[in-house]
Amino acid sequence: MKLSVNDLLIKALGVALIQTPKCNVTYTGDNLIKYSRADVSVAVSTPTGLITPIVRDAANKSPSAISAEMKDLAGRARDGKLQPVEYQGGTASLSNMGMYGIKQFEAVINPPQGMIMAIGAGEKRPYIVDDALGVATVMSATGSFDHRAIDGADGAELMKLFKQLIESPMGMIA
């Protein structure tokens, strides 16, 4: 099975949420709810608008299992055949506009979730490694955090972990 970049992004966000538990929360105004499982909602474009089917327990699934699940969820989302349990209740969201050539954007948090990760298109850019200039494919990741639920320093820690996972994806595949 061929993996997509999105499959690895879902896995990385799931792992980062588990490793940064203060970010794996929802906020309902009066209650901050903490989760031990990372359920990643993934934005999917359909003929009737966006919907966010959920990859449950994304941190503990292989990228190939995530890939198969997303293909199924996205197909049924486009056909209008998802059940409410399949798109309600995620702990964080991922929105990837890379396929549209969008370099960077800020996504709006999907309440009651405490955060959303916005992913831009991968593009070749100058990059310095060991004091040598080279070219690398680079993408942007912008985290939006509800500061009523997630402290900025905790959000920064999640972003750091997410970056490390994406820059060394073989650790997620093994």
Image (spheres, rainbow, N blue to C red):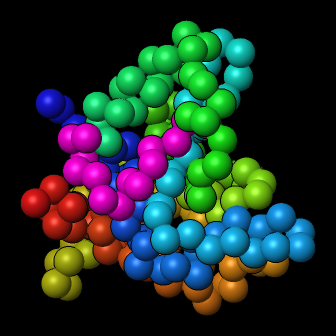
In the foreground, 39 or 171: 39
Residue 36 magenta-highlighted = no
Q: Residue lying farthest right?
A: 30
Query: Which quadrant of the figure contains the N terminus?
Result: top left
Q: Position of residue 126 (x, y in %)?
A: 31, 63
Left or right? Give the position of 159 relative to 65: right
Left or right? Give the position of 116 relative to 21: right
Image quadrant of residue 167? bottom left
Residue at image point 28% right, 31% down: 68
- Number of numbered discs on residues: 0
Residue at image point 35% right, 61% down: 59
Image quadrant of residue 23? bottom right
Left or right? Give the position of 170 relative to 111: left
Residue at image point 77% right, 68% down: 27
Left or right? Give the position of 11 relative to 84: left
Q: Position of residue 56 (x, y in %)?
A: 45, 48
Residue 54 magenta-highlighted = yes
Say if residue 22 shows up in the picture. yes
Query: Which quadrant of the figure contains the C terminus?
Result: bottom left
Q: Position of residue 164 (x, y in %)?
A: 32, 74
Q: Position of residue 17 (x, y in %)?
A: 47, 70
In the foreground, 120 or 14: 14
Residue at image point 57% right, 14% down: 81
Q: Which residues are magenta?
A: 53-65
Q: Is residue 151 above or below residue 8?
A: below
Q: Residue lying farthest bottom?
A: 153
Image quadrant of residue 71? top left
Say if residue 105 shows up in the picture. no
